[in-house]
Amino acid sequence: MSIKKTLIMSFGILAASNMLAQTVVPLYGKEIPNSIASPNEEKWVGRPDGDQWVTGVSIPTLTVFTVESKQVKAPAVIICPGGGYGGLSMSKEGFKVAKELNEHGISAFVLKYRMPSDKTMKDRSIGPLQDAQQAIFLVKENAGKWGIDTTKIGIMGFSAGGHLAALASTHFQQPKIDSKKVSVRPDFSILVYPVISMEDNLTHAGSKSNLIGKDAKEETVKWFSSEKNITPNTPSAFLVHAQDDGAVNVRNSLYYYEALTDNKVPSELLIYPNGGHGFGMCNKTTKDLWLDHAIQWLEDYIFKK
């Protein structure tokens, strides 16, 4: 039975009707780690498709979309929008997804993570990962206030946001933040047309250049290529990709799934024949909705644990 149905049948309420007002909270306190004092150059632009695109992020935040119930603690998903580490698709790959997750009784947190920049960060390569790990820590720290089940906190990412979500899923044992000994391991991940590898024959060139530089050393490339860092303790993943993706090679998802399988990490892979890149929640080449499959996967394999 779905989380949404449980809420309705047990308490006579619709999860979506009890959403708390969406609020934006700062990711850190007064000091942002790994930062350099600089002017705030963040810019928001509305796109013709209705998306909200933001660039120049140096002050990270979480936009909170919680489901309120005094009887049941909700699972949670931290959403990392994509944008090649040069911008963030905040609406199509963030806010709209969060609202849909709320409809299924899942609280969501849209992460506006820092864009890699030598002007705003001492080490631009780890800034986004610090923000993802801090988001997990912050949700756990405020779980009581937000009504979150701390055993069911996952991470979702689109494109370069998928790369970030995969990094958070493979580099949690040595946090890049002061997590006060709280585990920053996500309980699951949902990766949508993700950039996984930094290898030249697989990666999205813009994402690699923005994050680690096009001429990064071999050991750096390996560390940031999540298919090479999977262990039996890597959280289970649900992956979505289109075979004809011309921006991010479908083998990014295939190789990540293969490595999960080799390490006996139960996961699911959904490949569409068509759809290209950046389709958000709706692949217009099919009536099928990948989020329905992801919700079913969560209910069948993750939330029952």
Image (cartoon, rainbow, N blue to C red):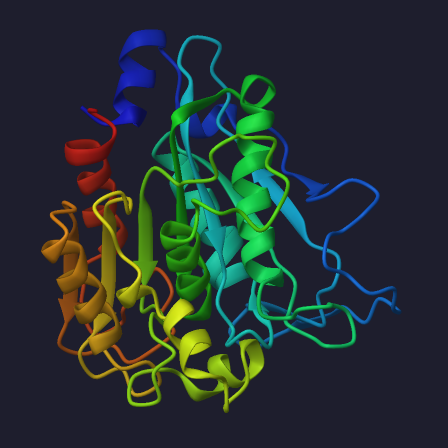
Residue sitting nearer the eye, 110 or 18? 110
Residue sitting nearer the eye, 276 or 182? 182
Left or right of 4, for residue 133:
right
Against 243, residue 80 (above or below) is above
Q: Position of residue 89 (x, y in %)?
A: 54, 67
Quadrant assignment, res 275? bottom left
Quadrant assignment, res 283? bottom left
Left or right of 132, for residue 190:
left
Can residue 65 be seen here? The reply is no
Q: Position of residue 181 (x, y in %)?
A: 54, 30
Residue sitting nearer the eye, 222 or 129? 222
**How many numbered discs sit on the rendered protein?**
0
Q: Position of residue 138 (x, y in %)?
A: 60, 35
Residue at 81% across, 72% down: 41
Residue at 17% across, 70% down: 254
Quadrant assignment, res 2? top left
Residue sitting nearer the eye, 239 or 176? 176
Q: Quadrant of the N terminus?
A: top left
Left or right of 122, for residue 299:
left
Against 31, residue 194 (above or below) is below
Q: Position of residue 175 (x, y in %)?
A: 53, 47
Residue at 24% across, 45% down: 236
Q: Quadrant of the C terminus?
A: top left
Residue at 18% across, 40% down: 296
Against 187, residue 37 (above or below) is below
Left or right of 194, for residue 237:
left
Can residue 29 be seen here? The reply is yes
